[in-house]
Image (spheres, rainbow, N blue to C red):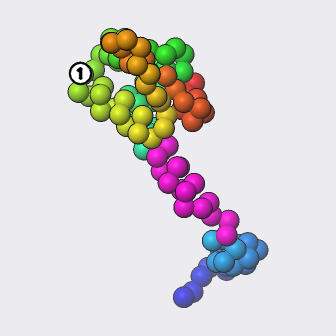
Amino acid sequence: MEIPDPIKKQVEKKGGLEGIIKLMPEEGELRLQSKIHHSLSDPLRVKILNLLSIQPLCVCLIKEITEVADSKLSYHLSVLKENGMIEGEEQGNWIIYKTTKLGDKFSL
């Protein structure tokens, strides 16, 4: 395989392919990065994340602010929750959503 000289020299400075591979994050970190990117890949989810970083909210208030249908909101909340960006806490008949430590890193 022929490699352009500038790239070949840069790869050699990093210890060859083995050196580059060693610099890559471990599989667990790659999975975490993938979850984060998936969570942030939709503007509505980013909006929800930012809302919850300002103030924990119930679904009814999130719905009023975002002006989306119940099913759509439920889907986006579940994506954020499954990927560790938010959590919901039952308080009586309500579920109050708030950001997690991970979610705080990617809001506002």
Residue 92 coordinates in the image, percent (x, y): 37, 11
**In the image, which residues are magenta?**
22-37
Give the total number of marks visible in the rendering.
1
Quadrant holding the N terminus: bottom right
* Residue 27 figure quarter: bottom right
Q: Residue at x 68, y 65 (%)?
A: 23
Main SS, magenta region, reads helix
Is residue 105 among the parts visible in the rendering?
A: yes
Quadrant holding the C terminus: top right
* Most distant residue in the bottom direction: 1
Residue 6 coordinates in the image, percent (x, y): 68, 75
Residue 15 coordinates in the image, percent (x, y): 73, 76
Q: Nearer the viewer, residue 67 or 95?
A: 95
In the displayed structure, 93 sits above or below 78; it is above
Q: Is residue 86 magenta?
A: no
Q: Amino acid at mark 1?
A: Ala
- Judge left or right: residue 26 versus residue 80: right
Q: Is residue 34 magenta?
A: yes
Neighbor class of circle 1 (other Cα within 10 Å; few <14, some 14-19, many 20+) is few
The residue pinned by badge 1 equals 69
Is residue 43 among the parts visible in the rendering?
A: no
* Residue 93 figure quarter: top left
Secondary structure under the numbered disc 1 in the rendered image: loop
Q: Residue at x 42, y 44 (%)?
A: 38
Q: Residue at x 49, y 43 (%)?
A: 36
Q: Residue at x 57, y 86 (%)?
A: 2
Q: Nearer the viewer, residue 80 or 65?
A: 80
